[in-house]
Image (spheres, grey):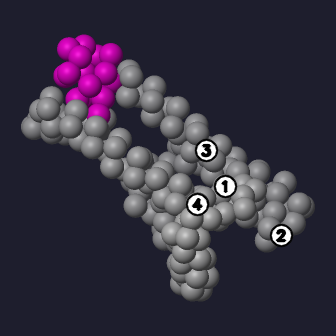
Amino acid sequence: MLASTAGMGAESIILGTARTQDPVTQGLVAMLVPFVDIFIFGLITALVIITTGAYDTSVLHPNLVGQALSLGLGSNIGLHLANSTNIFFAFCAIVCWSYYGDRAVSYLFGKQGVFTFRYVYLFFIIFGAVMIVESTLTMCHVFYGLMALPYLVSVFALSPVVVRLTKQHFRKIGSGN
């Protein structure tokens, strides 16, 4: 679940901004994202680690992908490449989660709550950066779990609507319209 945010409900915030006449097609396209993210990129990453033998070291390096790339390329450039990529992904995650939180707070508390949220969010960015890594990860797991609960409730509540719309969509496609 943590290789991607699929199933956490965050993507529905972004997808909800789209203006479409066919929500089923949008949902089908949206299901490709976790496949590409987890299967394609995960498979490529695993193959790099396995083929370079980086998994078979006596001391497991904290940046296993960087170690594998360094072994494959024959220099430390792999570590620098992996670290640069991590910085880019961390920045993207900070921006995306800021938007998700901004929209959620705006929906729950109105525009006046967004200003406060932004300061609290900035505090947690700094707080997370100076915390011990294990504590940060534990806190992230707890909040991911808490975030999944309302999403799962809404999935179960809306599943009859999704089933009905999906059947209508494929019936329409089958009839050639």
Q: Nearer the viewer, mark 1 or mark 4?
A: 4
Label 4 secondary element? helix
Residue annotated with mark 3: 94
* Residue 46: x %, y % from top left: 23, 41
The amino acid pointed to by label 4 is Thr
The residues tagged by marks 2 and 3 sit, at their Cα atoms, a distance apart of 22 Å
Q: Residue furthest top?
A: 75
Mark 1: amino acid? Ile
Cβ–Cβ under 8 Å for marks 2 and 3: no
Mark 1 vs mark 4, CA separation in Å:
15 Å
* Disc 3 residue crowd, few under 14, some 14–19, many 20+, Cα 10 Å: few
Question: Which of the marked residues, 2 or 3, is nearer the chain's N terminus?
Answer: 3
Q: Residue at x 83, y 69 (%)?
A: 109
The quadrant in which residue 18 appears is: bottom right
Quarter of the image where the N terminus is located: bottom left
Q: Quadrant of residue 100?
A: bottom right
Report the residue marked by disc 1.
Answer: 14
Q: Which label was assigned to residue 51?
A: none
Q: Residues within 10 Å of mark 1 (few under 14, many from 20)?
A: few
Task: Tell me which amino acid carries mark 3.
Answer: Ile
Residue 115 lies left or right of residue 32; in this view the side is right
- Tell me whether the residue at label 4 lies in contact with that at label 2, contact meaning CB atoms closer than 8 angstroms: no
Q: Is residue 75 magenta?
A: yes
In the rendered view, tell whether residue 42 sits above or below residue 65.
below
Which of the two residues, 168 or 72, is positioned nearer the viewer here? 168
